[in-house]
Amino acid sequence: MTRMTPLLERNEQFASAYTPVALGPPTAQMLIVTCLDHRVDPAIVLGLQLGEAPVIRNAGGRVTQAVIDDLAYLAFLAEQLFGGQDADDRLFEIAVVHHTQCGTSLLADPSFRHQAAEATGLPEAALEASAVADPNITIKADVDRLLTSPLLSPKVSVSGHVYDIATGAPHHHRGRPVPIAAKPALPRRGAARPAAIPARRPPRPITRRNRPEDSHAIHRNRRPHQPVRHRLEQRPAGGVHPLLGIAARPVDRPDPALASAGPRCVL
């Protein structure tokens, strides 16, 4: 008797009521990529039945190159055998499921990762890349890797989910239900481009004509009690004129004492 014996006994109950499933596309139009953790069984967690969805499992549920190769072949096989049966011409959706409390999170520790590399012969870089310390971060990286892979058929869509061990509920994290190839189309050569928004007119540069120091601006903004004098008259009350170089008399500022004596003739 081995540990497999109780499981074989359960299989007897299953085989007694078994109904074969014919070869065909997955009835749920889904393909699951998830961790091999025994607490995350898609058949139980998602209630899958036979023939509904293929399941790919590895440590952490990571999207490795081997997983991409398998997905590319399954998409090719489905398109060759069952292409055109779907109304919207899609093959299936790939659901990547990571989970909390993953055992691969231990690989984030350098000492533990070094011991694992010696025991398995795998490079430490590969072990570090497979660690699921934060499933909210790793699920984004794996979904992006699938969305940018040129090996997958454009008729395949991708979604990402994080399964919470504490609650038993998966949470949709990211992805898009449209085919991978449905990216924003670039404008074709020669196609009309949208009209550009006209730029704002720059302010007019300040020149000699529009300076506020112009004579007309001074005349317009002067106060009523300030007389306008010619430039030659704006000189000091005595001494030598700075421009003409001649002696100037104080004719623009008369002495108040002389003004009270009456008019005088200045020679």
Image (cartoon, rainbow, N blue to C red):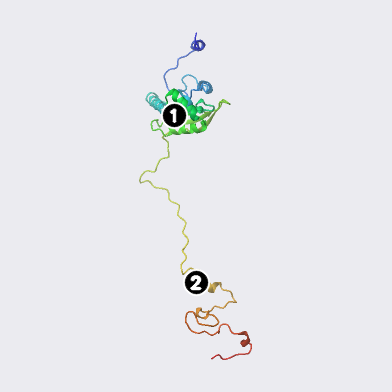
Which of the pair 145/90 is nearer the observer? 145
As drawn, which residue projects farthest toward the top?
1
Q: Residues within 10 Å of mark 2 (few under 14, many from 20)?
A: few
Give the left or right position of residue 228, taking residue 87 as reference. Answer: right
- Which residue lies under the disc numbered 2? 214
86, 29: nearer the viewer = 29
User: Is 228 above or below relative to 50?
Assistant: below
Q: Residue furthest left?
A: 190
Q: Residues within 10 Å of mark 1 (few under 14, many from 20)?
A: some
> x%, y% of residue 16?
49, 10
Q: Which numbered marker is on residue 68?
A: none
Rendered location of residue 9, percent (x, y): 51, 10
Hey, which quadrant is residue 20 in on the image? top left
- Residue located at (52% from left, 29% from top): 162
Q: Position of residue 201 (x, y in %)?
A: 46, 58
Vertical position of residue 58 compared to residue 148: above or below: above
Which element type, helix, strand or loop, lies under badge 1? helix
**In the picture shown, does residue 217 fall above or below 170?**
below
Q: Earlier in the sequence, mark 2 or mark 1?
A: 1
Residue sitting at x 50%, y 78%: 231
Q: CA distance from mark 2 to mark 1?
A: 79 Å
- Residue at the disc numbered 1: 124
* Image quadrant where residue 81 sits: top left
Q: How many marks?
A: 2
Disc number lying in front (2 or 1): 1
